[in-house]
Image: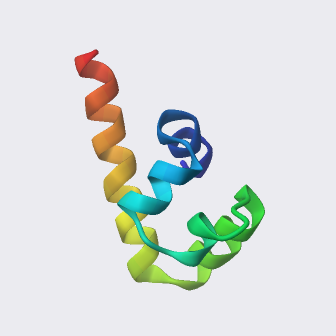
Amino acid sequence: MVTHLVEFYGWEELGQRITIRCFTHDPSINSSLKFLRKTPWARERVEGLYLKALRDAKKK
């Protein structure tokens, strides 16, 4: 999911859409996954953005 979002938006836009430190300061897939496993509210936001990205990709 995170990999798809990074490919779709890039780290900079992803950090703007969901303002969490693991996306804005020295981002990496590993640090993001570690944070998201421990933080349910952030995981919900990422899941919602992932679903939106899938819908937007189908429209193109």
Measured as percent of width and height from the top left, residue 36 is found at 57, 73
Q: Is residue 23 above or below residue 11?
A: below
- 22 to the left or right of 9: right
Q: Nearer the viewer, residue 42 or 16?
A: 16
Q: Is residue 29 above or below residue 36?
A: above
Q: Is residue 8 above or below residue 16?
A: above
Image quarter where the C terminus lies is: top left
Residue farthest toward the left in the current orientation of the protein: 59
Measured as percent of width and height from the top left, residue 11 is found at 58, 51
Q: Residue 25's quadrant in the figure? A: bottom right
Across the whole image, how many numbered discs are drawn on residues?
Answer: 0
Q: Is residue 9 above or below residue 29?
A: above
Q: Residue 16's quadrant in the figure? A: bottom left
Please give the name of the residue rendered at 66% of the width and 66% of the height, measured from the top-left corner.
33
- In the rendered view, how is the structure colored? rainbow
Please give the name of the residue rendered at 36% of the width and 66% of the height, measured from the top-left corner.
45
Measured as percent of width and height from the top left, residue 47 is found at 39, 58
Residue farthest toward the top in the current orientation of the protein: 60
Measured as percent of width and height from the top left, residue 57 is found at 34, 25
